[in-house]
Amino acid sequence: MKRLLVACLLAALAAAPVASSAQTAGGSLVVQVPTEPPGLDLTTNPASAIAAVVFDNVQEGLIKIDRTGKMVPWLAERWYTTDSKNYTFFLRKGVRFHNGRELKAADVKFALDRAVNPETKHPYRAQYEVIKDVIVKDDFTITVALKDVDATFLYTLARQGSVIYPREAVDTLKSQPIGTGPFTVGEWVRGDRIVLVKNKDYWVKGLPKLDRVVFRFIPDPNSTLAALKSGDIDVSAFGIGPESVDEFRKDARFQVIVGDTTNDVTLSMNNSKKPYSDKRVRLAITHAINKEEVLKGAMFGHGKILGSNVDPTNPYFVDVSKRVSYDPAKAKKLLAEAGYPNGFDAVFKVAPQYYYTVRSAEIIASQLGKVGIRASIQQIEWGQWLSTVFCLAPCQNPDYDMSIIGHAEAWDIGNFARPKYYFRWDNAEFRKLYEDSQVTVDDKKRRALYVKMQEMLADEAPAVWLYMHPRLVIAKKGVTGIWKDQPAPVQDLSEVAWQK
């Protein structure tokens, strides 16, 4: 407990953020993104396409994940707790929303209370259920009382669902979100672009560097390639196929940034329906997949093989990718034991907006065919994927066999402790491990629980974790300040600038 208190105090003593003077202010930047956001409200939709535009650019939280993956004080300049159940936060003074009003503790209470309220259907509500009460002490001091110890509570406050916004702007969050961030939403031309404009009253002195950021929606890697070469876009943050990396490395007009992410490309299975409700079938599917071949074919070798949803950026990561090895003979044996000696028919539902989904599915379908599983591929639009596969409300039951998508949220192992999550995996033993990890603040003991959870995920195979999607950024020479690694699902452009 003392260790946690010391950690909180150290965070509180961290220097306030300041801008670097090595960059040139002004100018515009055109950034390609592969998917148009379904909306701009981080509190109603978990889509990473929303976070890529809004999170830390337009709206911010009390705590921020910096480019190294560390939690740093942000809208809260410091905090403390003595019992890991009651946290008192001290807000920065002089921080203003885009509508000109100063941020107050009442705004924090409103945002957190709304996240807890089941009627708002917050996409990450389970992470806030531990909150018992939010108490405003004064305009710049607020206490959050928890029902129980939650070892991940501070990290929850750094997630995209914990952004702070004014009560009076809640009805316009989907199209015109207001926050405290370095940019404001200037324009959204459906089907083409979103334009962010510099917040001249931003509370971090000297930021942002850019006057204007344009997010262009270009889903096709070949079109993105052409747009870069023609000069129509300045940066591709998540859209160039990995097969183009070497080509751009040889082109003096560009720079290539390759780093790690929290984006775990996952083959999901609908555990609520046969045959995926049978562990033997799930293990057979896992044994039938040659992940190295998938990585080579879909990503040209860029990325890292995974064995669970805990990626290498996590301090509790252990490599469990060899626990269920590539073994087609064993896959056939397991299928026969499960009552499918001749295999079965299956359908992959994938969203082609993310190129790796189709590429990976094509390779895996071929591999599954060698053990008797006849898999076809159905490409559907992103909105349809969210409503039928991911099963966003009002959906009651996910409608799919298998799918492939990248899960970009860090520290999301708790999804497998949620029987109603779209995997529909229900395992009491795993839930108990996760619940224990949530109330364990001792780092060594918590790490041991995370190791057990990762091993259990590999052994039970509720999904197949394929690879970590690398951060592949292509930018024009002269663009500075882009993050190398992506420790959170965010495209923070506040420090990005052009060199003279």
Image (cartoon, helix red, strand yellow):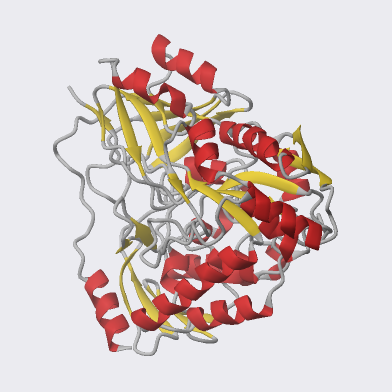
Q: Residue at x 31, y 58 (%)?
A: 94
> In the rendered view of the protein, which quadrant contains the N terminus?
bottom left
Residue 131 in sight from this viewpoint: no
91 or 297: which is nearer to us? 297
217 or 132: which is nearer to us? 217
284 or 375: which is nearer to us? 284
Can you tell which quarter of the image residue 382 is in? Answer: top right
282 or 98: which is nearer to us? 282
Would you place residue 122 above or below residue 131 in this image? above
- Looking at the image, residue 448 sits to the left or right of residue 403; the answer is left
Q: How many numbered circles does the render carry? A: 0
Would you place residue 169 above or below residue 34 in this image? below
Q: Residue 215: percent from the left, percent from the top?
A: 48, 29
Q: Residue 188: percent from the left, percent from the top?
A: 57, 30
Which residue is outermost to the left? 22
Can you tell which quarter of the image residue 422 is in? Answer: bottom right
Which residue is outermost to the top? 230
Q: Residue 439: percent from the left, percent from the top?
A: 48, 84
> In the rendered view of the protein, which quadrant contains the C terminus?
top left
Q: Residue at x 48, y 85 (%)?
A: 149
Residue 106 in sight from this viewpoint: yes
Q: Residue at x 20, y 70 (%)?
A: 13
